[in-house]
Amino acid sequence: MYVEDLKKDFYEFLAGKRVFLVVHYDIDSICACKILQSLLRYKHVSYSLAVVRGLEDLKTAYHENCADVKYYILLNCGGTLDVIEELEADEDVTFFILDSHRPTDLCNIYSNGQVKLLSLPDEDVGVPHFHDIFREESDEEEEDENDSEGSGSEDRASKRRRLDEESIMKRRERRLWEENRDKLVFDYSQFTYYARASAIRLFELAWQLNKEDKDLLWLAIVALTEQMLFGKIENTQYTLEIGPLQAHANRLQNMTNDTDVLTSLKIAFEKDLRLALYRHWSVEDSLKYSMFTAVKMKLWSLRGDKKLHELLADMGFPLIQSRQAFKSMDLQLRKEFHEVLEKLSEKYGLQDLVYASFTLQYGYRNKYCAADIVYALLAILEASPRDKKPEELFNLALDCLSRSKKEVLDSAIERAKIIVKTLFKTAQSALDLKQIITAGPFVYYIIQEGCLDWYMFSHLQILLLLAHFILRAYVAVSRNRKAPSLPLVVSAPKSMDAGTCIILGIPPLCENSPKNFFGKAFEQAAERINCDSKCDYFDTSYFEIHTKDRTRFFDALTALLS
Amino acid sequence: MYGEKAYALVKECANHENSLPPYNASLVQEVSNEIRTLVEENQEDAQTSTEETSDSGSVVSTIRLRHAAVKRNLRCLMAYHYNRLRLLRKMRWEFGSILPADIKSNLSPAEIEWFAKYSRSLASYMRSVGDDGLNLAVDLKPPKSLYIEVKCTVDYGRYELNDGTVLLLKKDSRHYLPRSECEELVRQGVFEHIL
């Protein structure tokens, strides 16, 4: 059931109640959580907060608290499964779900008030009608009872014959209906994809309540940028979402009368380059390791290296300058950087290098673009030392978003550079050693245990970035004409002790849409080979199996897709 | 020179503006000795001058000088003691009626006595305010908000709030609770206040 009036049925409804926030472990959720926290604070709603990484965590969090708390808000988790059944929830518990994962489970959509979806109804595409999915079971039984009451033994026989006919018809109709239902459900749940970021939805609520400010807007922007950077939404969707946010930014900027550079906070709508972290790195490194330029110019090869130097020479950037930190470069060069690169982008095949984004500026020195923050958060969440617990990292990520903790952000950006570098190097070695293997209907790449920084890739978002990088790089070098139409499956070791690995599938490049059909395919392949798998992730394009089953699993997948 | 020791005493106060140094009993004693000798000398001179009135003019100026020194020494002693008491009073509000041992060892017996008396009268005043007393020492600055966000630093288990709701305190979980409920746990180190 969708909540139509967020203000009345959600925000004001919660006033004075104890709420439990369950937050998924990703960037959008953290932004959304921060917005929600500040909203709940206005109403003095006391809450507790738990971070979950998968279904198991969600279950433990619920069962530990279900006796005490009756209102749960699930951020980016739980929407894709039947929460009532999965959690064995009591009747007096209410779930508010704001989940950007799609498709939303039908039981949640048609729940009679226990599950309340905070997203907009039109974000769910192609939801089947209620009567096509659910049916009153009791009809037939009642009729049977009525029949048995009928008296008179002589016409019973004839009646039975007629009944038989009727019941056959009825059964046939039922079978048809069931087939139809299965088909509808399959069509509906075939693809996994992402709807708009939860943080944006919550920012709109804040706006509705007149409680929005620039900090909250910035969170919404970061969440949107994350979706775009990780290829979770289409470019058109990004462009559509960015318009209203730009309007908000202008409005909020004009509302403040604080013009002092030292204290004011400024969100500017600017064109930005698809280069990772270049404001905090050197120009050469950023050009070399960013996915966009690396793939377009094939920078992993010797020839690519030469081409990069050629580009730098064309830009008029001396090597010494382009190798030092961006902020210590000559002012003149720094100012020209954008323009020159934009001008040359055509020549070097770097079309679409420029995209619209936002920058945040406060004080004299602090200028960050939204993508920088996304990378920093990624580094905190997924590339921190392994002995840290997710809760600690979550707290750290929340700190990173508050402007007062600059050192957290800066150290995170340093680590993000390492991630970007590792992505590049892994893709490079995959190409050099020809580890990307074509298996008929798809290509796959397996990250071996013990290869360079393999443990980094047991995290979901980094693995996703790697998959995008590898698929693009593969398409760029492959002689196979079908390459753009092949999807990619990547597998990375998850845990050495348990001997499990993660499998992630991403759709082919030519489809140009992030809708992912691998969720269902993985399930069916696992069914075929009867391996015990568990799908603990909310995003079903990730799958977890035992490493020893992997070869058989891939065979089954090949058979299934061809 | 007269008054030099008293000056040292005051300087000691000024050097330790926010902390309480050990009570400098020896220096205080020396200053009071100086005062005593000055007064005695003055008395002697006054005695002799009344007997021999011939060269009284010179004696008067000597007495005046000594008297000024005595007055100055007294002022310095007062300042020294007053400043210490002021700090002590501030500490009563900060630390409560029981002082930390390292501060207590710096006090003179008279100061300890004063502190006990001050605590007693403050306590009796706090009892008299309102129906059943009011602890004036908490929330000296008004809190910014009634609710605060806290982080749980240990696995504490279940905890019941004043209004009867129960919550589960797990390590690294975050909660947003009424300030009054948290204060005790923050002091125990179970919670950490998140700013």
Image: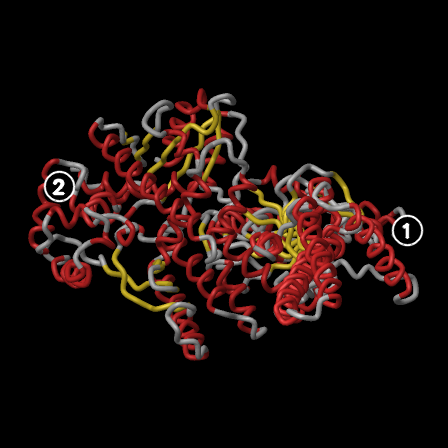
For label 2, the crowd category at 10 Å Cα-Cα, with few meaning under 14, some 14 to 19 and many 20 or more, is some
Look at the image and tell me in which quarter the C terminus of chain B lies.
Answer: bottom right
Q: Is residue A282 above or below residue B171?
A: below
Location of residue A23 in the rendering, given as x and y in whole percent from the top left corner:
57, 49
Residue at 34%, 43% in the rendered image: A414
Image position of A210 with respect to A318: above or below:
below
The residue identified by callout 2 is A304
Q: Amino acid at mark 1?
A: Ser
The amino acid sitting under disc 2 is Gly
Residue B97, image x, y percentages: 80, 50
Q: Mark 1 sits on what residue?
A: A151
Q: Can I make out residue A86 in this image?
A: no
Q: Nearer the viewer, residue A189 or A55?
A: A55
Compared with A55, A453 (above or below) is above
Of the two numbered discs 1 and 2 in the rendering, the one whose residue sits closer to the viewer: 2
Instruction: Between residue A293 and residue A87, name the one nearer to us.
Output: A293
Q: Is residue B191 left or right of residue A486?
A: right
The picture places residue A85, in percent across and down from the top left corner, at 68, 44
Neighbour tally class for label 1: few under 14, some 14-19, many 20 plus, Cα within 10 Å:
few
Q: What whole-number distance in Å separates the C-alpha atoms at marks 1 and 2? A: 91 Å
Chain of the residue that carries numbered disc 2 in the rendered image: A
Label 1 marks a residue whose chain is A
Which one is in front, A304 or B156? Answer: B156
Kindly state the secondary structure of the residue where label 1 is placed: loop
Picture layout, residue A187 above or below residue A35: above
> Marks 1 and 2: CB-CB under 8 Å?
no
Q: Can residue A24 be seen?
A: yes
| Residue A74 position in % (x across, y down) | 61, 52
Q: Secondary structure at mark 2?
A: helix
In-front residue for pair B159/A459: B159
